[in-house]
Image: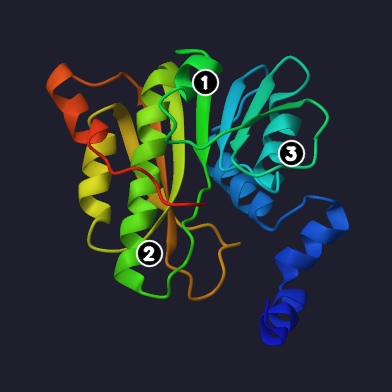
Amino acid sequence: MSRRFAADRRKDPYYRAAQEEGLRSRAAFKLSYLDERFHILHRGGRVLDLGAAPGGWSLVARDRVGGKGSVVAVDPRVVEPIEGVEFVRARVGDARLPARLGEGTFDVVLSDMSPSISGAYATDHARSVGLVRDALTLAHAALRKGGTFVAKVFDGDLLDPLQAEVERSFDRVRRTKPPASREGSSETYIIARGFHGMAPDDTRSVSKARPSPAI
């Protein structure tokens, strides 16, 4: 981490607030915003958090679904335990993961995954889209009918086709950028509600997605 980056981060009000509130990451404010705007999380809901490290989104989800709800967090990295959150150490693109998680058992699938940054924007954008496709494939197995899918993606020329893929499976799809996103960041969030599954012919466009890069 460069000294300049560290200094800029210390000046970031969302970073400071996350530290003060014990939220693990500033990304927690992004999920809070998305939930307040789109009503994603509900008491008693079952939530799957993909690419969960360091656990900021899992903390928010746990608090909002309450004691009668549940949160399952997936990441290939070791994450410090969170009371009330079940952690599964795995990569999202692992074909064995749906069976481990249970199919059709989640009300919400969240993905805040980012690719390893190469510095070449077209490459990073394409990798980001690939991660969303992996998350979407898993969401098709994991979501209950009527469920919600939320995923971060870097803006670029592949974004509209990606949204079109998501729209085949959900009743309502929106895009938004939370205020907590860093100034100049290209990240945006796809919010898809009303999961109804895909027609058989449509499943091929998702299943052909390339394996996701290292997170």
Where does label 3 land, which residue? Answer: 59
Kindly report which numbered mark, 2 or 1, lies closer to the viewer in this rendering.
Answer: 2
Residue at the extreme left of the image, as rendered: 201
In this rendering, would 144 be left or right of 68? Answer: left
Among numbered discs 3 and 2, the one appearing first in the sequence: 3
Q: Is residue 159 above or below residue 91?
A: below
Characterize the local packing of mark 1: few (<14), some (14-19) or many (20 or more) Cα atoms within 10 angstroms.
Answer: many
Query: 81 and 83: which one is in front?
Result: 81
Q: Looking at the rendering, in which quadrant would you find the N terminus? A: bottom right
**Alpha-carbon neighbours of circle 2 within 10 Å: few (<14), some, or many (≥20)?**
many
| Residue that label 1 marks | 107
Residue 83 x %, y %: 83, 29
Relative height, residue 176 to residue 179 (above, below): above
Could you tell me which secondary element the residue under label 1 belongs to? Answer: strand
Mark in front: 3 vs 2: 2
Residue 37 located left or right of residue 56: left
Q: Amino acid at mark 2?
A: Asp
Residue 47 percent coordinates (x, y) = 59, 26
Amino acid tagged 3: Leu
- Rounded to the nearest whole Å, what is the CA distance between mark 3 and mark 2? 28 Å
Q: Are marks 2 and 1 in contact (CB under 8 Å)?
A: no
Q: Measuring 77% from the left and 76% from the top, which residue is drawn there?
A: 10
> Can you identify the residue that label 2 sits on?
124
**Is mark 1 in CB contact (under 8 Å) with mark 3?**
no
Residue 164, relative to residue 45: is it above or below? below
Q: Give left or right: position of 111 versus 69.
A: left
In the foreground, 16 or 39: 16
Q: Secondary structure at mark 3?
A: helix
Picture quadrant of residue 94: top left
Residue at horizontal 28%, vertical 27%? 169
The residue closer to the viewer here, 16 or 126, is 126
Q: Going from the N terminus, do you reach mark 2 or mark 1 first?
A: 1
